[in-house]
Amino acid sequence: MLIKSATFVVSNTKISALPAPDMPEYAFIGRSNVGKSSLINMLVNQKGLAKTSQKPGKTQLINHFLINGSWYIVDLPGYGYAKVSKSSREKWEKFIRNYLTKRESLQCVFVLVDSRLEPQQIDLDFCCWLGECGIAFVIVYTKADKQSINKSKQNMAAFNKALKRWFEEVPASFLTSSESGLGKDDILTFVEEVNSN
Ligand code: GTP
Ligand code: MG
């Protein structure tokens, strides 16, 4: 799929103020600093569309971006940032879980996982929760440029193995780098296929 346009629409903390659910949408989620906003920018060829930061906790709201006038990318705040207070973490959880379980136009969740790390319990727990709720998701491994392909593949295989304890069928996955553009065509082709169904 060619990206002809990508524009910021709205940031929200209220489910009631989200854009009308009249176009397919794809949400990007994962631990703080895993590279959600960078991946979105890489996919749409715009460096500053989604705000990125070296410090975790940059994205705080539900951000809608309209792509080619016909579908949405949604940038979400990260989970697992230790410096966030318990009360604001609980608030975050409620709000994101509400969004993910109630959003009727949500086609698929992209769960971002750092390809440099061995399986992290927080990511596995999140995938299990999605599975329990019946929410469709795929895994996107990020920051592949930071190490050898072999190392990434080892970590991907270990994550898949861990998921197999809960899932009969392990979801699709993509290895990506926002620096090199690795994985871009595969993700956009996946979205195109889901959009056309
Ligand atoms: P929060 O919004 O805080 O949850 O973070 P995020 O998941 O949106 O991460 P963000 O895209 O802001 O990236 C965090 C840091 O990782 C930034 O310094 C990025 O430049 C860096 N980064 C993200 N993706 C990649 C990648 O593929 N390769 C490399 N080398 N660095 C990356
Ligand atoms: Mg972000």
Image: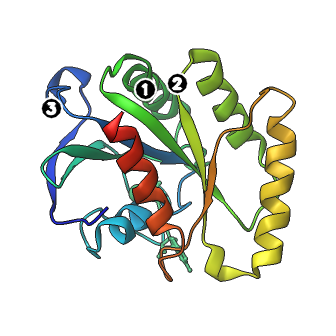
- Residue picked out by circle 3: 19
What residue appears at the point 32 percent right and 39 percent down from the top-left corner?
A: 196
What residue appears at the point 59 percent right and 26 percent down from the top-left corner?
A: 130
Q: Bin the neighbour count of mark 2 within 10 Å (Cα to Cα): few under 14, some 14-19, many 20 and up.
A: some
The three-letter code of the residue at mark 1 reads Leu
User: How far across and how far down the image is residue 57, in percent?
Assistant: 45, 54
Looking at the picture, tell me which residue is in the foreground, 41 or 136.
136
Where, quadrant-wise, is the C terminus in this rendering? top left
Which numbered disc flags the more N-terminal residue, 2 or 1? 1
Q: Bin the neighbour count of mark 3 within 10 Å (Cα to Cα): few under 14, some 14-19, many 20 and up.
A: some
Image height check: is 182 above or below 62? Answer: below
Distance Cα–Cα, label 1 vs label 3: 15 Å
Distance Cα–Cα, label 2 vs label 1: 8 Å
Instruction: Indicate left or right for 13 with 80 as reference.
Output: left
Query: Is disc 2 placed on a helix, strand or loop?
Result: loop
Image height check: is 69 above or below 21? Answer: below
- Name the mark nearer the viewer: 2 or 3: 2
Which numbered disc flags the more N-terminal residue, 2 or 3? 3
- In which image quadrant can residue 48 be found? bottom left
- Residue picked out by circle 2: 135
Splitting the image into four quadrants, where does ligand 2 fall? bottom left
Query: Is disc 3 placed on a helix, strand or loop?
Result: loop
- Residue picked out by circle 1: 100
Asked if labels 1 and 2 touch by Cβ distance under 8 angstroms, the answer is yes
Instruction: Indicate left or right for 63 with 115 as reference.
Output: left
What residue appears at the point 44 percent right and 32 percent down from the top-left corner?
A: 92
Distance Cα–Cα, label 2 vs label 3: 20 Å
User: How far across and how far down the image is residue 40, in percent?
Assistant: 37, 61
Q: How is the rendered protein coloured?
A: rainbow
